Structures are given as structure tokens and as C-alpha cells.
């Protein structure tokens, strides 16, 4: 089958979902009000609460949630065949991710920019909130620790990416100053920024940078991880308009240019899908497609991390409530497009079925490397780009998104620490909260694995925990809708499906960890399962109470 057909069907379905389904949700379910004063205005502080152009905010939100996961998940899941991966990405984007991300943003903006963790305290009770914060903290720890390891591996394996990756920070700083300090119209910094980014890619290809085996007594990978956390800590302390917003925005534009190149390569090259539609010849010890497909592909179908970003940073920058549809739902569509591209790269980017099988020799194989390899082949065959340049473009794309996710993830982790401090009656300032967040991530990175790879030690639980968090976030949105007397079926159905698959997956993994005598992951699995069941029970009790017009916070109401 031609990959062109897969591309057209997938892109068309997601576009229709945005044009029609998201409009229905915005008007009939969330009922967006263009005159509603968002927290970005009522709580404006110039640091975290900043009214932002919806296109710039979309760039921040999209690149913060994208990371490496919408590439890695589909690139692994195609081992079951491209049809299941394709269906889950497309249907998940339209009916799960869009309404989840959009809903978390709307709910937070209607409640003074509070995170879903703090919202759970208002809507389902203090016990549920405490357990919710535990799940949130674990997800953020997994993301920050694992993405640091992924980025360091790519910086070492693709030295041509070093200059464009770090040069992008300078580009973002300049754009932030031009837009906010000198009031330059958005068009020219956008065009200029993308051009400079791609010139940096050419420069990186001409002058690759490889670190020596040992730097300051650390391996090259360990040094990159240390540098990444240092940078992320500084970035999380700066006002969002200085670096976070412009970096995410320009990265979002760069991604769409990269996606455009990939899809053009598919159109011109017309590669055939060499991978099986349904793989009946799975490698030994491959897990069952149900429930593992639905937790392996998280970002790109639905992801709890998106709700953290939407309610943690994005809601504090929302200029108008009506912007939430574009930022939240279309952000999910953009990620679905990226995952669709990953599926095509990993199923049509190989010459033969045998070549594909040599990469997918076991479950968990493929990942970013298969995406870079397959995508590089598509760019070479379809557009005539040199293989090394194509690989550099895709590696830079993956690194920049993982990096922006780390920026936002560390800021979110600081918010969670500060919220936990408030619950304990302690005020944790910004610097202390950031140092604690970095300290915990570094302890995991260097205490649980060699060369700073400790974040990967707990990564096997990420997909399940992340999807569980998405289900719990949908439960908060559903409770809020019920309390306001609005239709809740459109969030309740995905909520039930996601909780069922996530809890099922936790039970499956519990058996795997027990047989492997992995007591760390087994213990975490049990804690997460108990927390999830408890929060779900609290949410059900809250739903049964019915309507409560006082569910939203008023503008002058003190934060709890």
C-alpha cells in the first residue's frame, strides 16, 4: 500500500476533527466566552502570568507537549503493525487528546490558572488532591530524567546536531526581545528565526562537535546531562517571555517546516509501506497489543503530561478564553501529525520487509533511531537531500522538542513542589523549588544508572502512568462539567476507556516486574495503582453529588 494514502486519510481526518468536532466542543460543552477575563490578565505578574498572542502560545504549548514521546511511542508500536498504530493515533487525537488538552486548559483558565492537581482538591477533595500530586510528580520525574538521557544520547550519536541545538537558544532570546521589548510584528522574527535555525543545521553538518570521552571527570553523556539540567533550571527561572515562549514558538515553526519536508518527500517519493498491516510474526516475548498499544502510544493519541502543561503554564498565558480551542485542540492535532509522520517513517522508510524486521527484532526496538533512519531515507529518496543532512534535520527536530519539554517540565515540577509546600503550610520560593526539582532529577539520573541514564530506570512505567494521569485529568474535567450542569458524555467515554486500559496495563506490568524481581518498579507500580483507584473513587463520589454552580473560582477568591 502507498504511504500517500495513509498520509491523506490521516491528515484529512484530523483536520476535520479540528474544524467540526472541536467547534462543537467549544460552543456546546465548554461554552467559551470571548469576554471572560483570563488569569493572564487578572493575575498578571510578567513572569508566569503573561497575556500571549495565540500563535506564540500555541508554539509554546505544542512544543512543550511534543518532546520525543510522539515519535518514540509510534516508532515502537508499529511492531504490532501499522494499522493499529494509525487508528489509535488518528482516533485518539480527534476524540481523546483534543478534548483532554482543550479541557484541561479551559478548566484551569476558569479557576485562576490552577493546575489539575490543585483543581482536584476543589472538585473531589483534599485526599484525592494529595494522591493526584504524587502521580503528577512521578510523571514529571520520569519525563525530565528520561528526556535528558535521550537528548544526551542524540547529541553524542549525532554530533552534527550540537551547533543547531544550542544555537536555537540564542535565536529564541533574540526573538523574545524583538517581540516583547521592541514590539516588532510577529511575522519577521518568525521568518528570520526559521531561516537562521536551518542555516545553523547546515553549519552543524559542516562542523560536527564531538566531546572527548571524558570532560571534567565525566563521560560525554554525563556532561551533556549536567549541562542540560543547568540550562533547564535557568530557563525555568526566567520570565516566560524571555526564553520559554520564543524558544517553543520558533521550534514549533521549525517542526512544521520539518513535517512539511517529510510529507513532501512522501508525495514525491511515493514510498510503499513495507511493514505489515497486522504483524502476525511478532518477536518472542512481545507483549499483548491490548492493553499495551494504548499506553505505548501516549503522546500522539492522548497524554496526561499535556494536561499538566495546559493547566500548569499555558493557562497562565491565555489571552482570550476563545484562544483555548486553537491552542489546546490544535496543539493535539499538531502532535497527531507528528506521530503520523513517525509511523510513515518507520514503516515506509525501509527498502524491504527484511530490512524492517532487522530493526524490529524485539519489542522496544526502533524508537528515535528508526525514525531518524527511516525519515532520512524518505528525505533522500523523495527530495534528494543528502542522507547525513536529512538525519541531522530529524535529530535536531527530536532534540529541540525533548529540550523544550524539559524546560516546561522542570518549571511544572517546581509548581508541584510549591503546591505541595502550600498544602503542608510552607511557602517554597521559586529558587528553592527549582533547586529541589533539579536535585531530585539529578539524583535519579546519576543515582539509578550509569552515565546519567538513571531516568531510563523508571521509564517502563511512564506510558502507563502518563495515560492514567490523562484519565484522572478527564475525571476532573468531567466532574466540573457535571457540577455546571453541562453534557459530560464526551469526556466520560474516553475517561472510562483510558482508566480501564491503564489499570489493566498496570496489572500486567505488575506481573512482569514481579517475575523479573524488579522491586523498585513493582513498588512504584503498586503505589501508582492505589493512588489511581483512590482518586477514581473520589471522582465517582463527586460526580454522584451532581450540579454545584459554585464549582468555578471567582476572580477575587483567595487561592486555597
Image: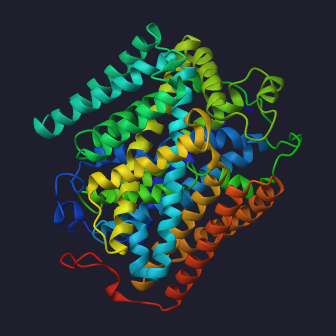
Measured along the vertical axis of the image, is residue 491 above or below residue 470? below
Q: Along the line of sight, which residue is nearer the eye, 505 or 14?
A: 505
Residue that protrudes farthest toward the bottom in the picture:
545
Q: Along the line of sight, which residue is nearer the eye, 412 or 556?
A: 412
- Quadrant where the N terminus sits is top right
Q: Along the line of sight, which residue is nearer the eye, 208 or 205?
A: 208
Which residue lies at the image location 49% right of the left edge and 54% below the top edge? 140
Residue that protrudes farthest toward the top in the picture:
206
Which residue lies at the image location 50% right of the left edge and 70% below the top edge? 132
Residue that protrudes farthest toward the left in the picture:
182
Residue that protrudes farthest toward the front in the picture:
217
How has the structure been colored for display? rainbow
The spot of residue 383 in percent (x, y) is 55, 16
The spot of residue 488 in percent (x, y) is 50, 77
For residue 99, side relative to residue 534 (left or right): left
- Quadrant where the C terminus sits is bottom left
The spot of residue 439 in percent (x, y) is 43, 48
Measured along the vertical axis of the image, is residue 521 above or below residue 256? below
Residue 224 visible in the current orientation: yes
Q: Along the line of sight, which residue is nearer the eye, 234 or 277?
A: 234
Measured along the vertical axis of the image, is residue 155 above or below residue 417? above
Q: Residue 536 is drawn in which quadrant?
A: bottom right
For residue 288, side relative to residue 240 (left or right): right
For residue 385, side relative to residue 356 (left or right): left
Which residue lies at the image location 69% right of the left edge and 40% below the top edge? 76
Residue 311 visible in the current orientation: no
The spot of residue 111 in percent (x, y) is 31, 72
For residue 191, side relative to residue 408 (left or right): left
| Count of numbered circles on the image | 0
Amino acid at each position: 500500500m502507498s504511504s500517500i494514502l495513509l498520509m491523506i486519510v490521516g491528515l484529512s481526518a484530523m483536520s476535520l476533527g479540528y474544524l467540526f468536532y472541536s467547534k462543537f466542543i467549544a460552543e456546546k460543552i465548554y461554552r467559551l466566552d470571548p469576554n471572560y477575563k483570563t488569569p493572564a490578565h487578572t493575575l498578571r505578574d510578567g513572569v508566569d502570568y503573561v497575556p500571549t498572542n495565540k500563535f506564540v502560545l500555541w508554539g509554546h504549548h505544542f512544543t512543550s507537549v511534543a518532546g520525543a514521546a510522539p515519535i518514540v511511542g509510534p516508532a515502537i508500536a508499529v511492531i504490532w503493525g501499522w494499522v493499529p498504530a494509525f487508528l489509535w493515533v488518528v482516533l485518539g487525537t480527534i476524540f481523546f487528546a483534543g478534548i483532554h488538552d482543550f479541557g484541561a486548559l479551559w478548566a484551569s483558565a476558569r479557576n485562576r490558572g490552577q493546575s489539575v492537581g490543585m483543581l482536584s482538591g476543589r472538585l473531589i477533595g483534599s485526599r484525592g488532591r494529595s494522591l493526584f500530586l504524587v502521580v503528577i510528580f512521578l510523571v514529571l520525574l520520569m519525563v525530565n530524567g528520561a528526556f535528558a538521557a535521550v537528548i544526551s544520547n542524540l547529541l553524542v550519536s549525532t554530533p552534527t546536531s550540537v551547533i543547531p541545538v544550542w544555537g536555537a537558544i540564542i535565536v529564541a532570546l533574540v526573538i523574545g526581545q524583538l517581540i516583547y521589548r521592541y514590539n516588532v510584528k510577529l511575522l519577521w522574527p518568525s521568518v528570520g528565526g526559521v531561516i537562521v535555525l536551518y542555516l545553523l543545521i547546515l553549519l552543524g553538518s559542516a562542523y560536527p562537535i564531538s566531546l572527548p570521552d571524558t570532560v571534567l571527570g565525566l563521560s560525554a553523556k554525563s556532561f551533556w546531562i549536567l549541562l542540560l539540567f543547568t540550562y533547564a533550571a535557568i530557563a525555568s527561572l526566567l520570565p516566560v517571555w524571555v526564553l520559554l515562549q520564543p524558544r517553543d514558538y520558533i521550534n514549533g515553526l521549525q517542526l512544521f517546516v520539518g513535517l512539511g519536508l517529510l510529507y513532501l518527500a512522501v508525495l514525491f517519493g511515493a514510498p510503499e509501506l513495507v511493514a505489515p498491516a497486522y504483524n502476525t510474526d511478532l518477536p518472542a516475548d512481545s507483549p499483548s497489543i491490548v492493553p499495551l498499544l494504548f499506553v505505548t502510544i501516549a503522546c500522539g493519541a492522548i497524554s496526561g503530561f499535556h494536561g499538566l502543561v495546559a493547566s500548569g503554564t499555558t493557562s497562565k498565558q491565555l489571552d482570550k478564553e476563545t484562544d483555548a480551542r486553537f491552542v489546546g485542540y490544535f496543539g493535539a492535532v499538531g502532535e497527531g501529525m507528528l506521530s503520523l509522520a513517525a509511523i510513515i517513517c518507520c514503516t515506509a522508510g525501509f527498502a524491504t520487509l527484511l530490512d524492517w524486521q532487522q530493526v524490529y527484532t524485539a519489542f522496544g526496538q526502533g524508537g528515535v533511531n528508526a525514525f531518524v533512519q527511516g525519515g532520512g531515507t524518505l528525505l533522500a529518496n523523495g527530495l534528494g537531500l543528502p542522507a547525513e543532512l536529512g538525519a541531522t534535520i530529524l535529530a535536531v527536530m527530536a532534540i529541540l522538542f525533548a529540550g523544550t519539554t524539559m524546560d516546561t517540565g522542570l518549571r511544572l515540577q517546581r509548581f508541584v513542589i510549591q503546591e505541595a509546600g502550600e498544602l503542608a503550610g510552607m511557602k517554597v520560593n521559586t529558587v528553592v523549588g527549582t533547586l529541589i526539582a533539579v536535585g531530585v532529577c539529578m539524583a535519579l539520573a546519576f543515582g539509578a544508572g550509569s552515565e546519567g541514564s538513571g531516568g531510563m530506570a523508571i521509564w517502563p512505567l511512564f506510558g502507563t502512568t502518563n495515560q492514567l494521569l490523562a484519565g484522572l485529568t478527564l475525571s476532573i474535567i468531567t466532574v466540573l462539567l457535571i457540577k455546571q450542569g453541562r453534557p459530560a458524555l464526551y469526556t466520560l467515554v474516553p475517561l472510562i476507556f483510558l482508566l480501564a486500559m491503564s489499570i489493566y496495563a498496570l496489572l500486567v506490568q505488575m506481573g512482569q516486574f514481579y517475575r523479573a524481581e524488579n522491586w523498585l518498579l513493582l513498588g512504584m507500580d503498586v503505589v501508582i495503582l492505589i493512588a489511581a483507584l483512590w482518586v477514581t473513587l473520589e471522582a465517582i463520589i463527586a460526580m454522584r453529588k451532581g450540579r454545584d454552580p459554585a464549582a468555578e473560582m471567582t476572580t477575587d477568591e483567595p487561592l486555597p
